[in-house]
Structures are given as structure tokens and as C-alpha cells.
Amino acid sequence: MRFSLNIPEQKFKSILESIGFVVKFFSQKTTIDPLNCFYAEFPFENMILDFALIKSKLAIEIYGEYWHGLKTVITPRQAEKRIQDAKKKLILSKNKWELIEIPSLSINKITKNRIRKQILNLLVV
């Protein structure tokens, strides 16, 4: 586990904290916190989730342009990463987790209100 966030993940962490969520790194020694605690770099089924609200089974993935190949022409490494992303979605779905996917380029454009609504809508269902 790397215990550090890249710049888009750091920005998103700030957004989560500004709308009232606690964000912690997950470790083997961590006790699970209340419903408002997202864990960064959460290990799940041989993969790492960028952010996980464990008790509510909500995952948030920040997709960077470089690694995830958000453009139409992609490298072989980006194609491999897209396959990993698809597998991650499938595993989360099979385990009844909700997933919010956020392209890193949109982090500066999204509003705190929009993120709050999107999270609350998934938690209320």
C-alpha cells in the first residue's frame, strides 16, 4: 500500500473533508469508524480503492488521464489499466458496492454540492 495520494486524489480528499466527511488511510490496525469516514487506499479483493465508505459500501475512483487513457488513442499500458478498471467495477458490483467514477480533469470543475448530492443519493437508496 502506498499511503500517499496523487494531486487529483489530494484535491478530492479536500472536497470530501469540506463537505463533512473524515478521510483516513486504511491500515491493518485501523478500527472501522462511523458512517462518515472514507478510507483512502482501501484494500478490497486484491485491488486498491481510491476512497471507500466501508459501512455504506460506496467506492470512489479518481481516473487520471495518463494512467486510465481518457483520450480516444491509448497506449498498451492504458488499455491494460482499462481492463483492470472493468474488472474492479465487476467485482464491486458483485459485492453490492456502489461506485462513483471521477475523471481527474473534472475535479477542479465539480462543486462540493454536486459531490454531496451524488454521495447522498447513493446512500439513501
Image (tube, rainbow, N blue to C red):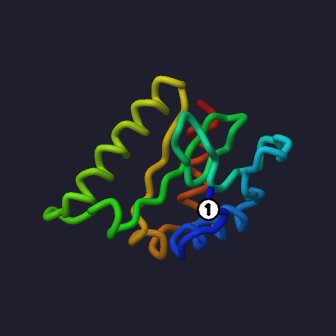
From the viewer's perspective, is residue 105 above or below residue 47?
below
Residue plotted at (57% across, 38% down) = 122
Q: How would you rate the neighbour count of disc 1 (Cα within 10 Å): few for under 14, some for 14-19, many for 20 or more?
A: few
* Picture mark count: 1
Residue 32 is situated, as x and y percent measured from the top left of the image, at 82, 41
Q: The disc labelled 1 sits on which kind of residue? A: Arg
Image quadrant in which the C terminus is located:
top right
Q: Residue at x 55, y 48 (%)?
A: 49
Identify the secondary structure beneath mark 1: loop
* Viewer-nearest residue: 34 or 116: 34
Where does residue 102 sit, x and y in percent of width and height? 44, 58
- Above or below 124: residue 34: below
In-image side of 37 versus 62 (left or right): right
Q: Quadrant of residue 25?
A: bottom right
Residue farthest to the left, as pictured: 73
Q: Residue at x 44, y 51 (%)?
A: 101
Image-based side of 102 in relation to 16, left or right = left
Q: Is residue 93 above or below residue 119?
A: above
Q: Position of residue 38 (x, y in %)?
A: 70, 51
**Which of the 4 quarters of the picture holds residue 17?**
bottom right
Placement of the N terminus among the 4 image quadrants: bottom right
Answer with left or right where residue 105 lies relative to residue 17: left
Q: Which residue is mark 1?
A: 2
